[in-house]
Every structure is written in C-alpha cells, then in structure tokens.
Amino acid sequence: MRGEKNELKMNVEKFFLLLQNYPDDFDSTSVFVRFLRSFLRVNASEKMLPTIEIMTLIKEQKPNVFYSMSKLSEEDNMLAFLTSLSMDFQEAESRLQSIYEGKGVGQ
C-alpha cells in the first residue's frame, strides 16, 4: 500500500511538471495523452485515482491541449470518457496539491 501511495504521488508530481514544462499547443497533446494512459495503470486499490482532478487542470490550464484531446476523442473511447470529466478548478488543484505534499486526498 505504501508503494501505491508513492507511485500516485510520483505521478501527480510528473503531471505538475508536464503542466509547467509543455506549452499549450497541439504538439503537446501526445505527451499528455501518453501520461494519461500511463496514469490510468497506477494501482491505487485503496483510493480512487484523481482522474477528474487531472482532467480539470488540463481543461483550465491547457485549453488547446484539451481541445485537441476532445477532437481525438471522436475515435478514442478512453479520451471521450476522460474529456467529459470536470469539477471545480480550485478543489481539483487543492486535492492534487494534497497528494503531492503527501497528505492524501483532501476532503
């Protein structure tokens, strides 16, 4: 279980780095899609993956990447599902920050 928590934290950290280091353009879309496919394989049996939170941050902070994902979703069921997920931006950011800081998902 400890390894699962570390794996989740490492993936959230990687996501924050992607947000910082990649521009909001079509060329970055494949990087984010690859990350999402890898992220969905994380074994977090005790907790749900913060997938909605991640998609919300992409939608708000990388709108062009999100738009490109939406276009790709016409032929990809996984992306169609993921691009339909959304929640309050502040709450999503707070929950991911809590995981990153090792506090678990904030309630």
Image (tube, rainbow, N blue to C red):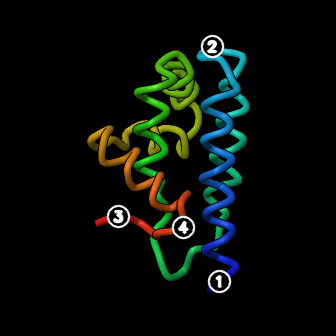
Identify whether 63 is placed above or below 87: above
- Side of 48 relative to 106 (left or right): right
Q: CA distance from mark 1 to mark 3?
A: 18 Å
**Which kind of residue does numbered mark 4 sit on?**
Gly
Residue topped by disc 2: 25
Which is nearer the N-term, disc 2 or disc 1?
1
What x and y, as percent, mark residue 58? 49, 32
Residue topped by disc 3: 106
78 or 47, nearer to the observer: 47
Tell me the mark number nearer the camera, choosing from 4 and 2.
Answer: 4
89 or 35, nearer to the observer: 89
What x and y, as percent, mark residue 91? 30, 48
Element assignment for label 2: loop
Which is nearer the N-term, disc 3 or disc 2?
2
Tell me the mark number nearer the camera, choosing from 4 and 1.
Answer: 4
**Which kind of residue does numbered mark 2 sit on?**
Asp
**Which kind of residue does numbered mark 1 sit on?**
Arg
**Which kind of residue does numbered mark 3 sit on?**
Gly
Q: Residue at x 50, y 63 (%)?
A: 49
- Side of 14 relative to 19 (left or right): right
Q: Residue at x 53, y 60 (%)?
A: 101
Q: CA distance from mark 4 to mark 2?
A: 31 Å
Q: Which mark is residue 2?
A: 1
What x and y, as percent, mark residue 98? 45, 59
Q: CA distance from mark 4 to mark 1?
A: 11 Å
Rendered-image quadrant of the N terminus: bottom right
